[in-house]
């Protein structure tokens, strides 16, 4: 059910200033990382790893490599959006993508504060955004990856699920399916949005089958269009999935347990992402059925993808978990305010230092757990 509107007005000005501050902080981290590399006489690589494929898609289009890695493993919305922006600005792909991602991250922070306010967190509505901004795994805000765009689509989907405008449920559901459509054209896991909407509202859609079918088809049209392109351009709708399999990614129950074991023993993987993954259980009553299903899918699909690389990036999109972590911190503030404030302060500073470290590694083209 849609929660009633909070009695207190949303602090629009404070949320805007906070989001701008978060975006500027990420920009500062990028500048520091670039300066460090140049001051040490090292080669600066603004476009490493997945970015090379996005750049190829934006500049020369797709190709199919039947015996190895290729750009078909990556979905089209982000690179084509950057291509359109390049035509307007004249910037190189990597500079354009980094600039756009910093803006998208700023928007996502504002949306996260707004959604947290919808959840009824009140004065604590900023705390999930603080934890999310500080988390080292959101270093992707300063590199040419898809997470900032996907975050905006995901948070827009969540906000529409709780919005009292538009008043028509059908229109809200259609707008949510549009978010799902664009999310599905951004990343394969975008199908989780439509799956969560359908399962969370199955009773309503069962009684209104035409609306349910429309929402389903519209929401899946992004990924279906990409699969249709695979078929007509390269002879089979599954070319993208075949390319992904060359990376070692395919659904596997054994892979799910392998991912958990890797996360448990990896030095890079700190305790906080595990808290994000599981802390939703602490406040699950705060969430709707669709939100709980979405948290499950966004966690389970990457964890079951057979290889655990990049999982820290994927888990940084579990916004319900950040709300749970914030709730846990708030309970601690009520009992031991000084100790918890000190712990939060140390956490934020240490995680920001880690972000700078990870950006340096990325801009040097190094291989590491979070990005490769």
Image: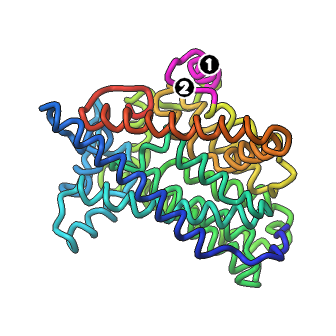
Q: Which mark is residue 196?
A: none
Q: Is residue 263 magenta?
A: yes
User: Taken as a whole, is the magenta stretch helix, strand or loop?
Assistant: helix
The residue lying toward the viewer, choosing from 271 and 209, is 271
Question: What's drawn in magenta, residue-wise?
Answer: 256-271
Residue 235 visible in the current orientation: no
Q: Is residue 76 above or below residue 70?
A: below
Q: Position of residue 368 (x, y in %)?
A: 38, 26
For disc 1, the neighbor class at 10 Å (few under 14, some 14 to 19, many from 20) is few
Q: Is residue 40 above or below residue 236?
A: above
Residue matched to label 2: 269
First in residue order: circle 2 vs circle 1: 1
Q: Position of residue 331 (x, y in %)?
A: 83, 43
Total numbered badges shown on the rendered structure: 2
Q: Where's the N terminus, which quadrant?
A: bottom right
Q: Position of residue 184 (x, y in %)?
A: 51, 57
Residue matched to label 1: 264
In space, the residues marked 2 and 1 are separated at their CA atoms by 8 Å
Q: Residue furthest bottom?
A: 167
Q: Are marks 2 and 1 in contact (CB under 8 Å)?
A: yes
| Residue at (55, 60) in percent of width and height | 109
Specify whether 284 is left or right of 223.
Answer: right
| Residue at (67, 67) in percent of width and height | 159
Q: Is residue 261 magenta?
A: yes
| Residue at (52, 34) in percent of width and height | 312
């Amino acid at each position: 059910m849609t929660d009633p509107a909070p009695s207190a007005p949303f602090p629009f000005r404070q949320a805007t200033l906070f989001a701008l501050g978060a975006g500027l902080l990420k920009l500062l981290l990028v500048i520091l990382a670039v300066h460090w590399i140049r001051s040490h006489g090292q080669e600066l690589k603004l476009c490493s790893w997945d970015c090379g494929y996005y750049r190829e898609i934006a500049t020369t289009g797709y190709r199919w490599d039947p015996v190895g890695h290729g750009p078909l493993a990556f979905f089209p919305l982000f690179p084509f959006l950057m291509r359109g922006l390049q035509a307007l600005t004249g910037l190189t792909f990597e500079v354009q993508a980094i600039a756009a991602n910093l803006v998208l991250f700023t928007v996502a922070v504002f949306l996260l504060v707004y959604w947290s306010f919808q959840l009824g967190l009140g004065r604590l509505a900023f705390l999930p955004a603080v934890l999310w901004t500080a988390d080292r795994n959101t270093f992707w805000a300063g590199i040419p990856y898809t997470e900032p765009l996907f975050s905006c689509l995901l948070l827009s989907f969540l906000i529409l699920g709780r919005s009292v405008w538009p008043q028509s449920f059908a229109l809200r559901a259609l707008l949510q399916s549009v978010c799902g459509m664009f999310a599905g054209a951004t990343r394969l896991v975008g199908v989780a949005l439509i799956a969560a909407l359908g399962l969370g509202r199955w009773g309503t859609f069962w009684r209104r089958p035409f609306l349910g079918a429309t929402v389903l088809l519209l929401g899946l049209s992004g990924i279906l269009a990409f699969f249709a392109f695979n078929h007509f351009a390269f002879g089979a709708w599954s070319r993208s999935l075949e390319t992904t399999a060359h990376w070692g990614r395919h659904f596997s129950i054994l892979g799910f347990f392998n991912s958990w074991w890797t996360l448990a023993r990896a030095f890079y993987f700190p305790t906080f992402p595990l808290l994000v993954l599981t802390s939703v259980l602490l406040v699950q009553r705060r969430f709707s059925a669709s939100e709980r299903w979405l948290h499950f899918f966004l966690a389970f699909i990457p964890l079951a993808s057979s290889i655990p690389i990049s999982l820290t990036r994927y888990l940084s999109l579990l916004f319900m978990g950040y709300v749970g972590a914030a709730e846990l911190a708030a309970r601690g503030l009520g009992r031991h305010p000084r100790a918890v404030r000190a712990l939060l302060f140390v956490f934020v500073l240490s995680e920001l230092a880690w972000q700078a470290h990870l950006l340096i590694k990325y801009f040097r083209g190094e291989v590491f757990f979070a990005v490769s």
